[in-house]
Image (tube, coloured by chain):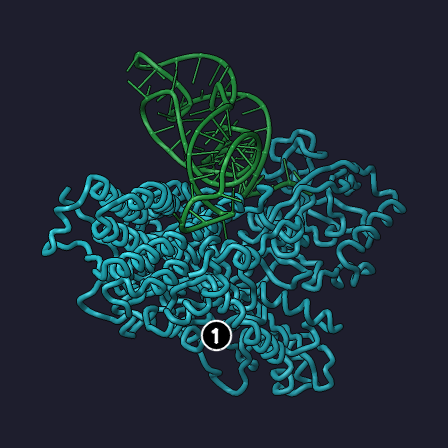
Amino acid sequence: MEKTYNHQKYEEDVYKLWEKSGAFTPKKDPKKKPYTIVLPPPNASGKMHTGNVLMIAIEDILIRWKRMQGYSALWIPGTDHAGFETQITFERRLKEQGKSRFDFDRATLYKKIWVFVQENKHLIEDQIRSMGASVDWTRNKFTLDPDVLETVVNTFKKMFEDRLVYRADYMVNYCPTCGTTFADLEVNHKERKDPLYYMKYGPFVLATVRPETKFGDTAVAVHPNDKRYKKYIGKEIEVDGLLGKFKLKVIADKFVDPEFGTGVVKVTPAHDKNDYEAGKRHHLEVKPVIGLDGKLNQKAGRFAGLTINEARKKVVEDLKKKGLLEKIDENYVHTVAVCYKGGHDIEPTILPNWFVKVGPLKEPAHEVVKKGKVKIYPKWQEVKYHRWMESMNDWPISRQVVWGIRIPAWYSTSENLNLQITFLNKDKVTKSGNLADLLKEYSLDEIRGGLQTLIAPADAKFSISDKNPGKDYLQETDTFDTWFSSGQWPLVTLGYPNSSDFKYFYPADVLETAWEILRLWVSRMIMFGLYLTGKPPFKDVYLHGIVRAMDGRKMSKSLGNVINPEEYQEEFGTDALRMGLISGTANGHDFNFPRDKVIAYRNFANKIWNIARFINLMFEKYSEETGINVPFLPDKKNKTQKLLKKEDKQILDDLNETTKKVDNSLEKYRFADAAEAIYHFMWDRLASDYLEKTKNREDKEISLSVLRHVYFNSLKLLHPFMPFITEVIWQELKDLRKRPDQLLISTPWPVINSKD
RNA sequence: GAACCCGUAGCUCAGUGGUAGAGCGUUCGGUUCACAUCCGAAAGGCCAGAGGUUCGAUACCUCUCGGGUUCACCA
């Protein structure tokens, strides 16, 4: 054995050894208990980030521990198509080539992204391997595999039949730059200084930051108790506008804050959430003036075709010219909604959308956690779940993204001549308009072939089917929110509904993930699991904290503080990186990347390596000198037990205590406690204390048998945490073992001796 | 605006109703035949501040200050 442990020399080979041995693939043995974890699928075209490393370390610890304890331990790997994120990445590529997604029909674009993802998928899978993850690759899944699509489509069909899916006009968070809608959860709020314009509006002056939406105003609102304006309530006023005079109703509504601005608000139901709600209360006309391209439409007269920002400038200019602008407050600070991906301004927009009716689904999902049928660790995270379940609204599931699972709804073109279509014609020129008009010039086949997007009115007729129901149909171009499909991940990975895997391994034992996606993902999985199988998809939920950068802030590209885990893997070894990260999980809070601990555990790896060298040396020396084999413990026949000295009994006791401590800590998902226990036992008790004492022992036969016994059992305890080096040593010392052919990964876990 | 979390050795963090621990760092001393990725020793903390509960609080409660995160939002 070399003087220091060189991780780079061994890691890859050891992983192959494990995989080849079949240890990752459990047998469905009815005599054994199953233990199941489903890997939260990382982005198929992405790279491993520090959070992924922590996730894999934790899950690998659990699975190796249970496997050694004799369970049929199954850990299923997989990758996610990550709809929106991947499409954005791909579009960036297109941009480098001077192209954009609008240059392709959706089928072609989908194929291109497919190829792109397939080319990259092995990268993340290789990284999962390099982490030592003992996942069962024979069951590897991708969220766009045919069987996944089948299940997701069937679920949607069932939900539709159960009246849990509906279509409706809805005010969505639309990002004109990204060209898609975002769920409320995906919208960020940013504080910003914007000019507040005070403009003359008939008899009123009112304040707004968005003068460009005035063409969509369909009322003016004041507070019902505002004495200043009481006489106008219910009346019509005449307004001198940029496009001529027009009339508006004055409504009274409590949403108006009389203290703000002048206490008068223009109401634009098509482009503001509050106004939309107010519009519903007062039956106001909804008049959209901004299109999906982020430009003003024909209703804005001569301002049509301008982007929002251009229009704002121009409108303000013209208001000034006409003397309709009273003043501008340049120091107005407010919060604006921006999309979480690119930070672009969100434009609240009315769109027909597919919805999941959440009421009947969330009640049982709330119950199982309340009743403890699903336990959340650490306990204090549970509050977040309950609060979310109480406030969860119906779930908009349509995304205007090509890269995803297309909603299996079909529109008959003969019955829906008012479909709004955008497509590329034979000459690759973009054409859009309503179907009736387009059909005058183009065949349906040409439209279908070049189809980009289709917007069906909320009352359009459709049928739900996994196949094209007839010749004259067009399929919905919206795709599912990725959480709709990944919400069924525990089901699809386990072969729901009829496979033998499903019968044996479902429900999973633990769902382990970052607390960040408790709402987005965990809650949905519980809902789907209960809805489709009547059982929650897992028993325990363990939520780990976010790994922050060394400066204590969240890692982000823009801050330039992102840590690339691969560098640490290379420099200090995967085992050290895993252990270092685990040390940060003690109480489940977020923590800063523990660089010092990674180094400390690299040193620890070297420590246990050198204990092995020492043992090796002592055994060689002993057999050379005496020609006798050191007896194995426990050894009742040979009376070794009776010859044990006090210090021998002490270290055996300590081993027993450490085993207990590791087991108990892991039962409670206290990974850092377990790691620390084994660390201090091996370094302080075994190496610094007991090993030193053996040097002076006369009865080498006894002390060496104890030393070997304790060390080998320590390796077992440590194996789930630091799988590579422990397995390497296990193989290096194979001649000192009873069963030299055995791999550590498949060795039984140390038994706790409870007699003492 | 609301909720939650945090404030413990120089740094990063554990922790407990009975007057504190780890890793790293620092200082001093070590080429003992497993390991300098090591060994031995040492220094270093009125556990943010104030009040309360208690025989006793760093730990429980209240408030203040400081930091973080999430959620919600008014033109």
Q: Is residue A449 visible?
A: yes
Q: Residues within 10 Å of mark 1 (few under 14, many from 20)?
A: many
Residue sitting at the far left: A637
Compare residues A259 and B27 and report the one nearer the observer: B27
Q: Is residue A660 above or below residue A70?
A: above
Which quadrant holds the N terminus of chain A?
Answer: bottom left
Image quarter for residue A46?
bottom right
Compare residues A139 and A472 and report the one nearer the observer: A139
The residue shown at (64%, 51%) is A338
The residue shown at (76%, 38%) is A205
Residue type of the residue flagged with mark 1: Pro
Q: Colour of chain B?
A: green
Q: Is residue A72 above or below residue A273?
A: below
Residue sitting at the far front: A625
Q: Is residue A365 visible?
A: no
Residue at the disc numbered 1: A408
Q: Position of residue A206 (x, y in %)?
A: 74, 39
Q: Colour of chain A?
A: cyan
